[in-house]
Image (tube, helix red, strand yellow):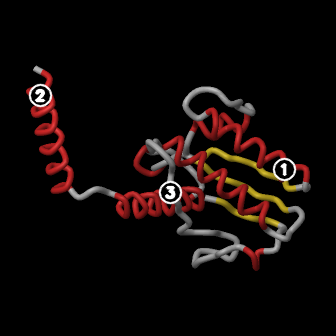
Amino acid sequence: WIQLHDSDISQVAALPGGVNECYGQYGSIEGHQTVPKAELTALIRLHEHLLGLTATDGDVVIYTDAKIVHDGCKKRKLGHGSLGELWCQYWILHDALVSLRWKIEVRKVVSHAHTKGVSQDPWLSHGNEVADYWAGVAADMVAVPEGDIQLLQWMDATAYTIQDRLVA
């Protein structure tokens, strides 16, 4: 979830909720999907988008409920581990934006603050709920129907049994 300040907002796809807010942006993830991978990929896509704008600078505040992404941005996490390649991509894009005088700040927001009894600015909670909603929409779009899962499991088990008998 992002909020842009001091940039040419006519170039930002904004939907209801405020002229500076961008809702409903989602895309695909290569390979096995995890929440940290999805969060970091979204951050990379945002940076790619900002580099494509004609604005030469601006202030961007990014809110994330993913601790690994927040901490990685604060500590300048380098390319190692399962997210190593994505961190390398992120820092190349981030440094390119900074060289163009963009100011990018990543802030941590508590997910599901109201259900956890955590006091948080309602504006932050709303933004997180909207981000979670769109994540759910995207997940539903690519979800495999339960009937297909059962069929694939049966086919896999049958293929394994045939292979086991051929080898024996």
Which numbered disc covers residue 23? none
Residue 112 position, x and y percent, is 45, 50
Q: Amino acid at mark 3?
A: Ser
Residue 116 position, x and y percent, is 43, 44
Which numbered disc covers residue 28? 3
Q: Residues within 10 Å of mark 3 (few under 14, many from 20)?
A: few
Dot 2 or dot 3, earlier in sequence? 3
Residue located 91% across and 55% down the image? 101
Q: Label 1 vs label 3: CA separation?
A: 24 Å
Residue located 65% across and 69% down the image? 21
Secondary structure category for the residue under label 2: helix
Q: Amino acid at mark 1?
A: Ala
Q: Residues within 10 Å of mark 1 (few under 14, many from 20)?
A: some
Q: Label 2 vs label 3: CA separation?
A: 39 Å
Q: Label 2 vs label 1: CA separation?
A: 57 Å
Residue depth check, mark 2 versus mark 1: number of the one nearer the observer: 2
Which numbered disc covers residue 166? 2
Residue located 79% across and 65% down the image? 5
> Which of the image's four quarters has the C terminus?
top left
> In screen coordinates, is 70 left or right of 27?
right
Dot 2 or dot 1, earlier in sequence? 1
Dot 1 or dot 3, earlier in sequence? 3
Label 1, on which residue? 96
Query: Which residue is outermost to the top?
Result: 168
Secondary structure category for the residue under label 1: helix
Secondary structure category for the residue under label 3: loop
| Among the 4 quarters of the image, the one containing residue 148 | bottom left
| Among the 4 quarters of the image, the one containing residue 52 | bottom right
Residue depth check, mark 2 versus mark 3: number of the one nearer the observer: 2
> Which of the image's four quarters has the N terminus?
bottom right
